[in-house]
């Protein structure tokens, strides 16, 4: 089948690469415009664009989905199907109606759970033990289309957004190829979503501020779910400190107060203790908590600034 692939970040690469290796034809790629990133604001191409260019595939980067020239170009390409993997924009009806086999989305949750932009992060933040991949036929709703295939995956106790995203991207690629083959042969039967939906709205940097009144387990989930972006953080004497690795510990203490400052930085919570193992001071590199304690000469009894 003739495919137009919509995707932007690294999560989409395994699916894109899988399609390139398959018997299907990727005739064009649609991805987000190049953006300035990093401290030095270097103009950077999305990962999907880099792979497409290396393979000699035409790349389209519209600023707006309803751009008449872009819509005209898509229509001229005449794709049999559009595949969407972490593209980052909502497709308008004109595009959804274009391909005869519809628009297929690879979504990183077991729909209808975690509809929205950040399903992997929220699954970890909310303490879920299982997640997965859903391939679905897109409609005009937010991740409300009929389900094609699903595959579940356990969330490990030490999973971060980064590690879980990597594993899910590989599962998503395999499930996409299976979906495409069954779609082409007519062996797949779309099914309406069933169950109570939950939602995964976009995360902002401000969402990473740790509320020390939460339990140690909840704080651990927040740190893991927000690593590496947007990052969980706290304030120490007004300085923003990103927390990158923690473990829960037995015991009790006052929420937000440093109970022990040694090789680990042990902090009280609403229930239990959090041992900070790695952190990143503002404008500095990630470091072991022990090095941070020694460099700042921290003592027990100091409290992190609360909400």
Image (cartoon, helix red, strand yellow):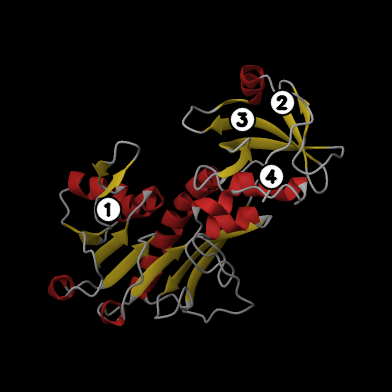
Evaluate if marks 2 and 1 touch, with contact meaning CB atoms under 8 Å apart: no
Q: Is residue 80 left or right of residue 289?
A: left
Can I make out residue 152 in this image?
no
Q: CA distance from mark 1 to mark 4?
A: 39 Å
Q: Which residue is under mark 1?
A: 20
- Which is in the foreground here, disc 1 or disc 4? 4
Q: Is residue 11 left or right of residue 60?
A: right
Out of 116 and 196, give the one closest to the viewer: 116
State which tag comes first along the sequence, 2 or 3: 2
Residue drawn at x 77%, y 37% as measured from the top left: 257
Residue 220's tag is 4
State which tag comes first along the sequence, 2 or 1: 1
- Which is in the foreground here, disc 3 or disc 1? 3
State which tag comes first along the sequence, 1 or 4: 1
Percent x, y for residue 72?
A: 13, 75
> The N terminus appears in which quarter of the rendering?
bottom left
Task: Identify the secondary structure beneath mark 1.
Answer: helix
Q: Which residue is under mark 3?
A: 278
Task: Identify the secondary structure beneath mark 2.
Answer: loop
Out of 188 and 164, give the one closest to the viewer: 164
Quarter of image, res 297: top right
Residue drawn at x 62%, y 53% as measured from the top left: 124
Rate crowding at label 4 as few (under 14), some (14 to 19) or many (20 or more) other CA atoms within 10 Å. Answer: many
Residue drawn at x 63%, y 21% as measured from the top left: 296
Quarter of image, res 113: bottom right
Rate crowding at label 3 as few (under 14), some (14 to 19) or many (20 or more) other CA atoms within 10 Å. Answer: some
């Amino acid at each position: 089948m003739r495919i137009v692939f919509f995707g932007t970040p690294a999560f989409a690469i395994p699916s894109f690469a899988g399609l390139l290796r398959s018997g299907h034809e990727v005739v064009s790629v649609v991805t987000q415009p190049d953006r300035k990133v990093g401290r030095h604001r270097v103009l950077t191409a999305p990962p999907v664009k880099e792979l497409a260019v290396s393979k000699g595939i035409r790349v389209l980067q519209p600023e707006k989905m309803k751009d008449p020239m872009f819509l005209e170009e898509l229509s001229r390409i005449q794709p049999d199907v559009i595949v969407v993997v972490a593209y980052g924009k909502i497709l308008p009806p004109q595009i959804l109606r274009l391909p005869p086999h519809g628009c297929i989305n690879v979504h990183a949750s077991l729909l209808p759970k975690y509809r929205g932009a950040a399903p992997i992060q929220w699954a970890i933040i909310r303490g879920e033990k299982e997640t997965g991949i859903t391939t679905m036929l897109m409609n005009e709703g937010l991740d409300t289309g009929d389900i094609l295939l699903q595959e579940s995956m356990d969330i490990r106790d030490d999973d971060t957004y980064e590690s879980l995203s990597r594993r899910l991207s590989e599962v998503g690629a395999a499930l996409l190829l299976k979906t495409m083959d069954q779609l082409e042969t007519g062996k797949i039967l779309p099914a309406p979503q069933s169950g109570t939906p939950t939602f995964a709205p976009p995360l902002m940097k401000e969402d990473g501020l740790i509320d020390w009144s939460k339990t140690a387990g909840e704080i651990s989930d927040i740190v893991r779910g927000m690593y590496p972006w947007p990052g969980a953080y706290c304030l120490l004497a007004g300085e923003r400190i990103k927390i990158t690795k923690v473990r829960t510990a037995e015991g009790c203490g006052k929420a937000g107060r440093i109970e022990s400052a040694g090789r680990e930085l042990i902090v009280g919570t609403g229930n239990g203790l959090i041992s900070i193992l790695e952190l990143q001071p503002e404008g500095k590199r990630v470091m072991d908590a022990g090095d941070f304690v020694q460099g700042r000469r921290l003592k027990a009894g100091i409290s992190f600034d609360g909400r």
